[in-house]
């Protein structure tokens, strides 16, 4: 039986086919050369943590396959400003159209509206999509271990670094952690632990807490998904996890910025 991740990846393969028809590598390189230098994504996140705060990647997400429509009143530029004022270190913008009702234009709008660095949140399995991420103004890309083999992970990471993009590598369990550690990425990446299983949608903060003892020393870990209450943040920070990726709980509030402030106060 094919699960949601398989379904998404099948659509991505079609999208990559279309992208290849639309842009040659040189055409994308031309678009990239028109972009300003990426804003330091990891640096912004780490600066908040160094200063003793929570480093939050605040997510701009209209809908998801597990929750359906999350926010009807959806203005990415306005939300980006809310998040910036609420103390976010970085933004995450969903660009997947079919499953998350995202768009590349939402990333452009959010990034132009503020000075925060932005991660392109999508299912990236081809170098062309990494180039596209840079061409639309992304500062960081997500690489999902569950969607990639070791060698692909290594190649896409190298491609991103060459384009001066930061990388968030996402895992969900021990096997994926081993896969990432074996992929030979050096230490130039943020390690995201997704508390949500992308195949079943089951979400538990224990996912992060259980994997912590297995992580290499000095690993810059980001806990992702299901963070909804100040107590969730406190629990993580008590376990020395200071970087967060938070979407839904903020997007559901009338003022996402105020919600962020309250969450990390
Ligand atoms: O809305 P939440 O539960 O706060 O989760 C945000 C983020 O972690 C989630 O959107 C996410 C994590 N990894 C992903 C991979 C693809 C799409 C989405 C995601």
Image: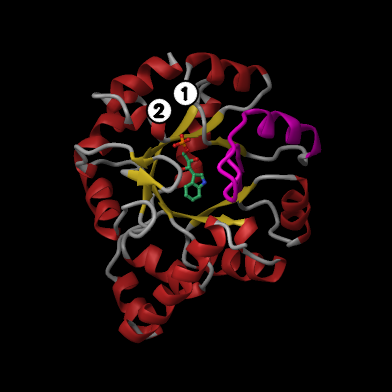
Whether 6 is among the magenta residues is no
Looking at the rendering, in which quadrant would you find the N terminus? Answer: bottom right
Q: Are marks 2 and 1 in contact (CB under 8 Å)?
A: yes
Badge 1: few (under 14), some or many (20 or more) residues near its Cα, within 10 Å?
Answer: some
Residue 122 visible in the shown view: yes
CB of mark 2 near ligand 1 (< 8 Å)? yes
Q: Which residue is pictured at 59% across the width and 67% down the height? A: 158
Residue 31, above or below 66: below
- Residue named by callout 2: 249
Q: Nearer the viewer, residue 215 or 37?
A: 215
Q: Quadrant of residue 241?
A: top right
Q: Secondary structure at mark 1?
A: loop
Mark 1, ligand 1, within 8 Å: the answer is yes
Say above or below: 119 vs 125: above
Mark number displayed over residue 228: 1
Highlighted range, magenta: 190-214
Residue 213 among magenta residues: yes
- Which percent across, then down, holds residue 139? 41, 54
Residue 195 drawn at (x, y percent): 60, 37
Q: Residues within 10 Å of mark 2 (few under 14, many from 20)?
A: some
Q: Position of residue 183 (x, y in %)?
A: 73, 62
Sequence-first tag of 2 and 1:
1
Instruction: Report the quarter where the C terminus lies.
Output: top left
Left or right, 108 with respect to 29, comes to left
Please give the name of the residue rendered at 19% of the width and 37% of the height, measured from the top-left corner: 73
User: Which disc is residue 26 wearing?
Assistant: none
Image coordinates for residue 217, horizontal then vertical, percent: 77, 37
Q: CA distance from mark 2 to mark 1?
A: 5 Å
Q: Which residue occupies the foreground of this view, 186 or 78?
A: 78
- Look at 62% across and 31% down and name the residue there: 204
Going by the image, does 246 lie left or right of 71?
A: right
Residue with the most extreme front position? 1
């Amino acid at each position: 039986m094919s699960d949601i991740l398989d379904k998404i990846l099948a659509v991505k393969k079609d999208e990559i086919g279309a992208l290849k028809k639309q842009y040659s590598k040189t055409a994308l390189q031309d678009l990239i050369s028109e972009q300003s230098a990426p804003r330091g994504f990891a640096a912004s996140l780490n600066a908040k943590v160094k200063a003793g705060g929570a480093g939050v990647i605040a997510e701009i997400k209209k809908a998801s396959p597990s929750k359906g429509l999350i926010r009807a009143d959806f203005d990415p530029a306005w939300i980006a400003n809310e998040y910036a004022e609420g103390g976010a270190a970085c933004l995450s913008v969903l660009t997947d159209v079919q499953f998350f009702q995202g768009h590349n234009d939402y990333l452009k709008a959010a990034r132009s509206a503020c000075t925060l660095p932005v991660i392109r949140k999508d299912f990236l399995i081809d170098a062309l999509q990494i180039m596209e991420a840079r061409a639309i103004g992304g500062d960081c890309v997500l690489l999902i271990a569950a969607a990639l083999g070791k060698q692909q992970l290594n190649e896409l990471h190298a491609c991103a670094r060459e384009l001066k993009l930061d990388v968030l590598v996402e895992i969900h369990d021990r096997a994926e952690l081993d896969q990432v550690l074996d992929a030979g990425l050096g230490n130039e990446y943020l390690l995201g632990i997704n508390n949500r299983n992308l195949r079943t949608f089951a979400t538990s903060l224990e996912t992060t807490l259980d994997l912590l003892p297995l992580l290499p020393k000095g690993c810059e870990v980001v806990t992702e998904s299901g963070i909804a209450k100040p107590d969730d943040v406190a629990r993580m920070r008590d376990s020395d996890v200071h970087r967060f990726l938070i979407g839904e709980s903020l997007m559901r509030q009338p003022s996402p910025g105020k919600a962020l402030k309250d969450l990390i106060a």
